Image (tube, rainbow, N blue to C red):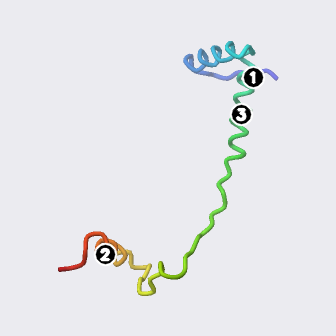
Amino acid sequence: MRTTINISEPVLRSARRRAAERGVTLSTFAEDALRAQLARKESAVAPAFRLHTVRGRLVRPDLDLNRTSALLALDDEARFGGHE
């Protein structure tokens, strides 16, 4: 099938050079490039999210995860020492 598209001169020069290096026509090179790009889009499905949880000594039952300011304060205390 014949169609017309507009391609910038620098991109067209690069495409012609690559096609010549590979010994194929510009049409074949463009079709292969489009096919590769389309294949990448189809396989670029994000993996399913999986939440990992922990039990035991890592869990602190006194922490309220809804109070981020308290979490930041505990992190600062652990990193820089407690109040003096």
Tag in front: 3 or 2: 2
Kind of residue at disc 3? Ala
Observer-nearest residue: 28 or 78?
A: 78
Where residue 49 sits in the image (x, y, percent)? 63, 63
Q: Circle 2 sits on which residue?
A: 73
* Label 1: how many Cα within 10 Å (few below 14, some 14–19, many 20+): few
Q: Is residue 44 left or right of residue 9?
A: right
Task: Assign a secondary structure to mark 3.
Answer: helix
| Residue labelled with disc 1 | 3
- Foreground mark, 3 or 1, reads 3
Q: Count the labels in the image.
A: 3
Q: Which amino acid, mark 2?
A: Ala
SS class, disc 1: loop
Compared to residue 66, the image places residue 22 above or below, namely: above
Left or right of residue 55: residue 16: right
Q: Residue at x 71, y 31 (%)?
A: 34
The spot of residue 79 in percent (x, y) is 30, 69
Q: Amino acid at mark 1?
A: Thr
Q: Tell me the residue that label 3 is attached to.
A: 36
